[in-house]
C-alpha cells in the first residue's frame, strides 16, 4: 500500500472538517468553511501513483481513438464549441494521450493538452504529433487569454489543488471563452444509494468530489462565471455529472 500523507482543504487550509466516509485507508472530509469535499489522506507521491495507474491503462485508452462510434459522438459533442472560435486554440486539461484532441484537430482547432502522465503524453507527441505538456496546467505557463475552449473530462476529481487549477484556467481562457468540465457529483442519488460501493468512490485517486454548491464556490473564488450545472441521471452504473464554467 502506498504511503499516505494528511492534507487540508485547498481553499481554507487547516480548518475543522467533517468526516463523511472512511475507506481504503483514507476518508472523505467536508471542509466546514467552504464545503469542499476532499480525501483527507493521499499518496505521498501522487504523481508516481497516477503514473502507475494510468500507464497500465494506456493501451485501452489509445484504442478509443480508432472507435468510430466514439469519434462520431465526440464530433457531435465538440461541434457546438465552434461558436466560441476566435483565437482558434483548444486546450484539454487531463488529456492523457490525446484522443479527444485528435477529434478537435480534425474539426479545425489548434489543439493543446496537459496531463501529468509521462507515458501518455509521450505517446501522443510521438505517435499523433500532438502538442502535449507533461505536468500540471500551472507548470505549462500558457499566456493570458490564450484559449477559446478549455475542455476537461474526468480529471478535476484527480487534481490535488482544484482552486489553483481553476484559477489558472480562468487566467488562460480568453474573456468570453468557455470551460467545460465533467466530474464526480457527491450529491448523486446513485452515491446516496450505494455509498462506499459506488465505483466513483476512490479516495486514493478521486481526491476531490464536487457538489453543485461547492462548484459555485470554486467558480467565485477562481474568477470564473458559472453558466450551467447538470447531471446525467440515476443508474446503478452511474455516469459522472457535468459542469460548465465560463469567464465573464
Image: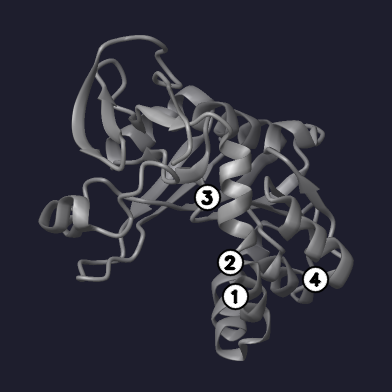
The answer to whether residue 164 shows anywhere in this view is: yes
Residue tagged 3: 155
In three-dimensional space, the C-alpha distance between marks 1 and 4, rounded to whole angstroms, equals 26 Å
Q: How many neighbours does mark 4 have within 10 angstroms: few (below 14), some (14-19), or many (20 or more)?
A: few
Whether residue 212 is situated above or below residue 13 in the rendered picture: below
Residue tagged 1: 60
Residue mark closest to the camera, 4 vs 3? 3
Q: Position of residue 139 (x, y in %)?
A: 75, 32
The total number of labels drawn is 4
Q: Earlier in the sequence, mark 3 or mark 2?
A: 2
In three-dimensional space, the C-alpha distance between marks 3 and 1, rounded to whole angstroms, equals 17 Å
Residue mark closest to the camera, 3 vs 1? 1
Residue at the (45%, 22%) spot, across then down: 10
Give the SS element for disc 1: helix
Give the SS element for disc 4: loop
Residue at the (74%, 57%) spot, across then down: 119
Residue at the (88%, 66%) spot, across then down: 126
In three-dimensional space, the C-alpha distance between marks 3 and 2, rounded to whole angstroms, equals 15 Å
Residue tagged 2: 57
Residue tagged 4: 108
Q: Earlier in the sequence, mark 1 or mark 4?
A: 1
In three-dimensional space, the C-alpha distance between marks 4 and 2, rounded to whole angstroms, equals 28 Å
Amino acid at each position: 500500500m502506498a504511503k499516505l500523507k494528511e492534507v487540508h482543504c485547498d481553499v481554507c487550509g487547516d480548518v475543522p472538517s467533517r468526516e463523511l466516509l472512511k475507506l481504503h485507508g483514507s476518508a472523505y472530509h467536508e471542509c466546514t468553511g467552504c464545503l469542499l469535499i476532499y480525501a483527507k489522506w493521499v499518496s505521498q507521491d501522487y504523481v508516481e501513483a497516477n503514473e502507475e495507474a494510468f500507464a497500465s491503462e494506456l493501451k485501452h485508452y489509445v484504442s478509443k481513438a480508432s472507435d468510430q462510434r466514439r469519434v462520431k459522438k465526440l464530433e457531435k459533442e465538440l461541434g457546438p464549441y465552434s461558436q466560441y472560435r476566435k483565437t482558434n486554440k483548444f486546450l484539454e486539461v487531463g488529456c492523457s494521450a490525446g484522443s479527444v484532441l485528435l477529434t478537435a484537430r480534425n474539426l479545425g482547432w489548434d489543439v493543446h493538452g496537459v496531463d501529468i502522465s509521462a507515458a501518455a503524453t509521450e505517446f501522443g507527441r510521438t505517435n499523433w504529433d500532438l502538442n502535449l505538456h507533461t505536468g500540471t496546467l500551472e507548470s505549462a505557463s500558457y499566456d493570458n487569454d490564450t484559449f477559446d475552449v478549455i475542455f476537461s473530462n474526468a480529471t478535476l476529481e484527480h487534481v490535488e489543488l482544484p482552486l489553483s487549477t481553476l484559477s489558472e484556467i480562468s487566467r488562460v481562457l480568453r474573456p468570453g471563452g468557455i470551460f467545460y468540465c465533467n466530474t464526480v457529483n457527491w450529491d448523486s442519488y446513485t452515491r446516496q444509494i450505494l455509498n462506499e460501493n459506488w465505483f466513483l468512490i476512490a479516495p486514493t485517486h478521486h481526491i476531490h468530489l464536487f457538489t453543485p454548491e461547492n462548484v459555485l464556490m470554486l467558480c467565485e473564488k477562481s474568477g470564473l462565471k458559472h453558466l450551467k450545472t447538470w447531471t446525467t441521471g440515476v443508474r446503478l452504473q452511474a455516469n459522472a455529472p457535468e459542469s460548465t464554467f465560463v469567464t465573464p
